[in-house]
Amino acid sequence: MLTLVYALVLGGIFFLFIAAVGVVRMPDLYNRMHATSKAATLGVGLILVAVAVFYWELSVAARALATLAFIVLTAPVAAHALGRAAYLSGVKPCEDTYIDELAGHYQKNHKLESVEVKPPASDPSE
């Protein structure tokens, strides 16, 4: 069992290393986000599975797998939101990008802005 834990941790370290190299070596923001959202999620996932296997307790395994589920569900959504915000803000892809599949799908005057939420008006009769 300890061999499985070592293999999972080494696999996780490998994919986290690949994600770090991807952040440093990739030419633009979009490729860097792809490297981090894919490889880092897999690396962290392998390490969390190793934690669950190593401790072999229901409470630890449940927390590790819940954390893994949270990361697997939120990392792609966060990468998509950052990529969309970068695209709408005018961040250009690298010169090797030949096709802009989003061109023409957004209006030229599309702006990213937050919506102000006003508190509900208090009732003077209370």
Image (cartoon, grey):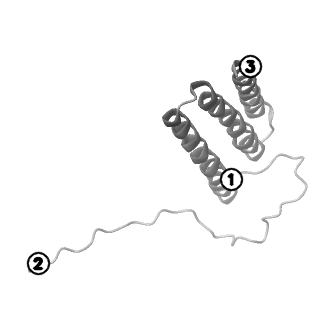
Would you name the residue on which mark 3 appears?
Answer: 3
Around disc 2, counting alpha carbons within 10 Å, would you say few (fewer than 14), some (14 to 19), or many (20 or more)? few
Q: Are marks 3 and 1 in contact (CB under 8 Å)?
A: no
* Residue type of the residue flagged with mark 3: Thr
Question: Left or right: 61 with respect to 120?
Answer: right
- Residue sitting at x 73%, y 24%: 4
- Residue sitting at x 48%, y 36%: 59
User: Residue 18's image quarter?
Assistant: top right
Q: As displayed, is residue 36 above or below residue 90? A: above
User: Residue 33's image quarter?
Assistant: top right
Residue 71's tag is: none
In the rendered image, the residue lying farthest to the left is: 125
Q: CA distance from mark 2 to mark 3?
A: 69 Å
Question: Left or right: 117 with respect to 93?
Answer: left
- Residue sitting at x 57%, y 47%: 70
Would you name the residue on which mark 1 appears?
Answer: 83
Q: Secondary structure at mark 2?
A: loop
Residue 62 x, y percent position in the rendering: 53, 40
Q: Relative to the observer, which residue lies in front, 36 or 101?
A: 36
* Residue type of the residue flagged with mark 2: Pro
